[in-house]
Image: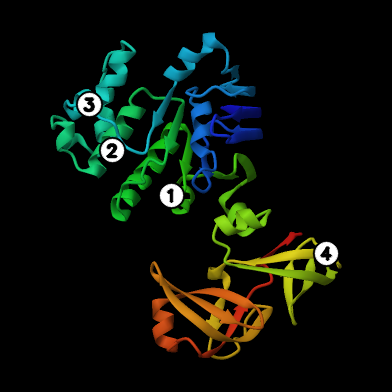
Amino acid sequence: MINLRNISLRLPSGFSLEIDSLRVAAGEVFGLIGPNGAGKTTLLNILGLLQEADSGVLEIGGGNAFLPSARTRLRRSMAYLFSRPYLVNDTVYNNILLPLKFRREKDSGRVAEMLDVFRITYLRDRNANQLSQGERHRVSLARAFVTKPGLVLLDEPFSSLDARVKESIISDLGRITRAANTTVVLVTQDQEEALALADTLAVIKNGRLLQRGSPEEIYSRPVSKEVADFVGVETILSGEVRAANDNLCSVAVGGSELEVVSSCGAGDKVLLCVRPEAVSVSRTVESNSMRNHFRGRIISAEPWRLEYRLSIDCGFSLIAAVTKRSMDELGLKPGDGVYASFKATAAHLIKR
């Protein structure tokens, strides 16, 4: 659906966007994640033909999207949703009908279909100004999909919603896009949104794509410290591979030896990454398949969402995610001695 090559854009602010290559398959839900100011919306605006690049190639549906003669046709085949749903002062029905009127197309039951699909039939005759924030988002999505677009661009579409409403809408949107085989590009800082919807993720920072891959690849095997930091790898340790045998590496970190499954070789300087949820914490040494066991002391225990983040001094700093139930059952508190464990497959090495 999308093939982008050598896109370059420099804005008056001095920010520059440089994207060597980006491909999005037809029917794919593609998530673009990154911090504020990374260039996510700028890239989305180029894909939506709202911003012209200084140079490069953009093909949408196999055709040159930068040709002036193709612009109107391509814009009609896509929908763009902003972070805030902009609705006109009219009924829900007429808001959803609006794109069809612009295209001089008849309703033919499509508005009723969208009302049903997004579960808002009961709002049909209500004025858009009387809706809750969640209802406004559903109406905005129904309006976007009423033309049966081949490409939908979403720019932080759920940032103003509370968690419960967001979860419900994301669930419905995922079901609808896959049923319609619609290609979606989602821009977000919310990694949970991206994980819930996206087939493929790309991380962007300072106008450059740092990594592209499946959610599993991005989160478990980041290619750089920048990516690891952004996707929540809280333990990043400098080390050196002392030995490697059949992809099992012995890595020296401080005064400890850690075992990691990796293709790195002896002598490689590396960063060793471990996600907090991969670390198990116990009062005694666990007899299990985990190759890495370390005696440590809890330095801090901070609540984080429905879990606790434990900082453990094992001769090196290790961050573990522990459920509240485990905290209570084990009676864990700062100063306690514990054992921290993780599998050799749970760690990831990045060459320095």
In the drawing, does residue 260 fall left or right of residue 123? right
Circle 2: residue type: Arg
Circle 3: residue type: Val
Secondary structure category for the residue under label 3: loop
Q: Which residue is mark 2?
A: 138
Q: Which residue is mark 1?
A: 193
Q: Position of residue 205 (x, y in %)?
A: 59, 45
Q: Which residue is mark 4?
A: 268
Q: How many marks?
A: 4
Circle 1: residue type: Glu
Q: Which residue is mark 3?
A: 88
Give the position of the N terminus as an image quadrant.
top right
Q: Residue furthest top?
A: 69
Q: Earlier in the sequence, mark 1 or mark 3?
A: 3
Q: Residue at x 54, y 81 (%)?
A: 281
Residues at marks 2 and 1, CA–CA distance in whole angstroms: 16 Å
Q: Residue at x 19, y 29 (%)?
A: 92
Q: Position of residue 238 (x, y in %)?
A: 72, 69
Q: Nearer the viewer, residue 239 or 151?
A: 239
Q: Residue at x 60, y 75 (%)?
A: 318
Secondary structure category for the residue under label 1: helix
